Image (cartoon, helix red, strand yellow):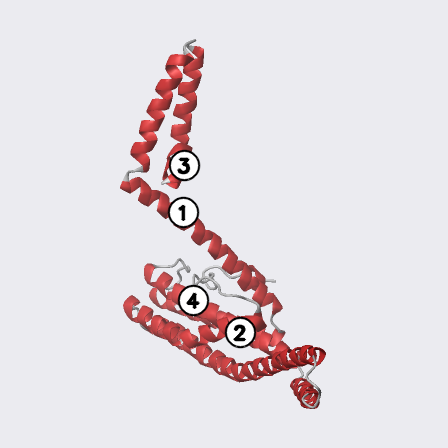
């Protein structure tokens, strides 16, 4: 309730009325009479407006809009950071697919409005939003692939296996001791170190397996996006295009889950599903 009262109070017309009432009370020379009236009127106004369902919905909508803009800005910044960090081959691959979608959009526009500009129609906007969603996943896949490449290059699996072998040998030798408190402390340290080494090796194997999976998903999604962009040229059916985009997006759930599990490698965390605009407004990072 407090946020509704706060919103009602901060309304500029309410603030003007309050300040005017206070000023008139002071100027009149009878603030002891005027100020209580202003306070009573303000209390009644705030109680009535803050409890009104329509006003509450308006406040909630404004709050949601502000949060959505903030999340959108955060996602856009993350997308630009990803693009800047990609190797040239991955960057060019993304640019090529993005340009392909834009070219097909221009073809569709010329077919239905020869000589016209690219002012988005309702249908066009729906298609673009869908392609933006998929391009956003595509970019995250490219970034994940790049992160896995770096992780695999910098992690020596043979060295980890060697460490495991050495630790196991030390533990085996320790088993021949007298079981003193000192030996037990050493044993616990070695066992913990051995567990950590096994975890590292498991992470490496997981990253290696997911690297192949991500590469296959990149190719699959790239082909899907091309197909949807080509479909948009010939089929002016909003429901059909949207359903196709939703089907592709649903098929990427396992992929999204995999990318979330690989946060320890990518460091990109989990972003809001609202995709940045990659076709209607090219990311500034792609222009530089």
**Residue at 35% of width from left, 41% of height from top?**
1
Measured along the vertical axis of the image, is residue 208 above or below residue 258? below
Residue located 34% across and 28% down the image = 43
Q: Secondary structure at mark 1?
A: helix
Is label 4 in a helix, a strand or a loop? helix
Q: In the image, residue 149 lies at what x, y percent? A: 61, 79
* 35 left or right, relative to 197: left
**Camera-nearest residue between 9 and 131:** 9
Name the spot of residue 93 as percent of width and height, x first.
Answer: 54, 75
Mark 3 vs 1, N-terminal side:
3
State which quadrant residue 47 falls in.
Answer: top left
Which of these two is toward me, 189 or 108?
189
Badge 1 density bin: few <14, some 14–19, many ≥20, Cα 10 Å: few
Residue 57 drawn at (x, y percent): 31, 45
Alpha-carbon span between mark 4 and mark 3: 36 Å
Of marks 4 and 3, which one's residue comes earlier in the chain? 3
**Considering the image in quadrants, where does the C terminus appear?**
bottom right
Q: Which residue is mark 3?
A: 6
Q: Quadrant of residue 83?
A: bottom right
Q: Secondary structure at mark 2?
A: loop
Q: Is residue 103 visible?
A: no
Residue named by callout 4:
133
Residue that mark 2 sits on: 262
Residue labelled with disc 1: 63
Q: CA distance from mark 2 to mark 4?
A: 20 Å
């Amino acid at each position: 309730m407090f946020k509704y009262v706060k919103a009602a109070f901060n309304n500029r017309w309410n603030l003007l009325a309050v300040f005017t009432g206070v000023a008139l009370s002071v100027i009149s020379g009878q603030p002891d009479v005027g100020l209580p009236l202003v306070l009573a009127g303000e209390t009644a106004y705030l109680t009535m407006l803050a409890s009104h369902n329509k006003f509450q919905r308006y406040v909630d909508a404004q709050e949601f809009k502000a949060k959505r803009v903030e999340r959108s800005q955060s996602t856009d910044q993350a997308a630009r950071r990803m693009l800047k960090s990609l190797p040239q081959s991955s960057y060019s691959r993304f640019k090529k697919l993005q340009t392909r979608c834009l070219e097909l959009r221009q073809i569709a526009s010329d077919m239905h409005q020869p000589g016209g500009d690219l002012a988005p129609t309702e249908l066009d906007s729906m298609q673009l939003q869908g392609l933006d969603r998929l391009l956003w996943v595509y970019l995250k896949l490219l970034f994940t692939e790049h992160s896995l490449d770096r992780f695999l290059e910098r992690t020596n699996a043979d060295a980890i296996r060697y460490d495991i072998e050495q630790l196991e040998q030390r533990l085996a030798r320790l088993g021949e001791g007298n079981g003193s408190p000192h030996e037990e402390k050493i044993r616990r340290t070695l066992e913990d170190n051995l567990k950590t080494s096994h975890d590292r090796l498991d992470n490496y194997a997981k990253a290696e397996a997911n690297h192949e999976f991500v590469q296959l998903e990149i190719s699959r999604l790239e082909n899907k996006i091309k197909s949807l962009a080509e479909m948009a040229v010939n089929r002016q059916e909003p429901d059909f295009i949207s359903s196709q985009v939703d089907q592709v997006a649903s098929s990427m759930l396992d992929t999204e889950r995999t990318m979330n599990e690989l946060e320890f490698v990518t460091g990109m965390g989990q972003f809001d599903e609202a995709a940045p605009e990659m076709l209607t407004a090219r990311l500034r990072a792609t222009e530089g």
